[in-house]
Amino acid sequence: MNIYITYKKTFFTENQIKHLENYANLIFLESYFDLDEAEYLQDNTEKILMVDPKWYKRNMRKEHISKIKNLKAICINTTAFDWIDWQYCKDNGIIVTHTPKYSTDSVAEYAIFLMMCLAKKLPIQIKTNYKMEYTHEMLNAEIRNKTVGIIGLGTIGTRVAELCDNLGMKVIYWSKSPKENKYEKVEINDIFEKADFIIPTFSINEETRKIITDDRIKMMKGNSLINIIINPTEIYNHKLVLERAENNEINYAFEIYDNKTLNDYKGNIMATAPYAFYTKESIDRLVDLWCNNTISVLENKPQNVVGS
């Protein structure tokens, strides 16, 4: 059995490597490669792939997977699994595991950081080289007593709600399924009409891609949208939100996926590199869970299986 790992070996501890080597031969593919020339395509032995999405540009489809001989499982190191053709794998007896909940605190805290950046006009401070002017444009806002609207109250959404509640904010939410909590559940349109800060935290699928419509974006008046879940162009009209923010009609924070910089955007727009998940603690949890998922497959007791 071979295990091909598309990740840097330095992210793994010595104990993690030894534990995996008790079950199989490890082959690290640390540099990006042409998919048609992937080393494992020439390997006829039974194998597991431990996969990071960057090596596949977040798009691992059946056209590539079908070429891999004797593939037992693909163990991915992300919570989201929309970037891999897991249905093809399921239909063809290939196990796919993912890594849920490893970055809950990291991502939730990043949402609060972005919210604070907008409230305190940090993007404008940076873009004006911290010029000190006590103008209406630079007037900050206090977080206490503001309303935050959370779309999707799963693990991350619940943690965001807890943090906002501890800051003295009113928490309202919309979620597809009922939740037991102390927060007020409202209709989806109420989020866009009433919340001072809107934070989507839902999982990405074909149904949720239809939640943040152009009509709902146009409902926003003076409030802020904070996106921490994925490339904004994949879930709503990013261009429309940017236009409204650059016209000073709303505030906007998101992670950049198009190689632009903060200075490429006008107005109170906070744009950062996609670091929401990237803390020492979350990466430690991620690699540990990733290894454990792989070992669970090797022991024929797979855990965190996609589509199970």
Image: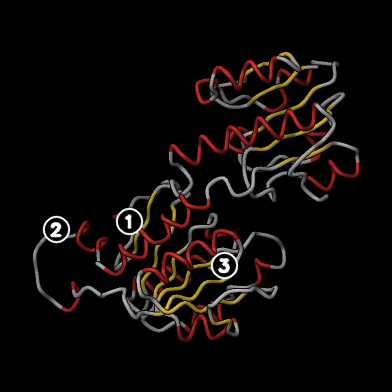
Q: Is residue 19 above or below residue 152?
A: above
Position of residue 294 measured from the top left corner of the image (x, y, whole percent): 72, 30
- The residue under the point 46% across, 57% down is 108
Q: Secondary structure at mark 2?
A: loop
How has the structure been colored for display? secondary structure
Q: Which residue is mark 1?
A: 264
Disc 1 or disc 2, which is closer to the eye?
Answer: 2
Question: Which of the two labelled residues, at mark 3 and mark 2, occupies the earlier sequence position?
Answer: 2
Question: Which of the two labelled residues, at mark 1 and mark 2, occupies the earlier sequence position?
Answer: 2
Q: CA distance from mark 1 to mark 2?
A: 17 Å
Q: Residues within 10 Å of mark 2 (few under 14, many from 20)?
A: few
- The residue under the point 57% across, 38% down is 286
Q: Determine contact: label 3, label 1, CB under 8 Å.
A: no
**Looking at numbered disc 3 in the image, what kind of residue is underneath it?**
Tyr
> Which numbered marker is on residue 6?
none
Q: Is residue 37 above or below residue 159?
A: above
Q: CA distance from mark 3 to mark 1?
A: 20 Å
The image quadrant that residue 296 belongs to is: top right
- The residue under the point 52% across, 47% down is 103
Position of residue 208 measured from the top left corner of the image (x, y, whole percent): 66, 67
Question: Which of the two labelled residues, at mark 3 and mark 1, occupies the earlier sequence position?
Answer: 3
The N terminus, quarter of image:
top right
**Looking at numbered disc 2 in the image, what kind of residue is underneath it?**
Tyr
Q: Secondary structure at mark 3?
A: loop
Q: CA distance from mark 3 to mark 2?
A: 32 Å
Position of residue 8 measured from the top left corner of the image (x, y, whole percent): 54, 24
Q: Which residue is mark 2?
A: 130
Q: Secondary structure at mark 1?
A: helix
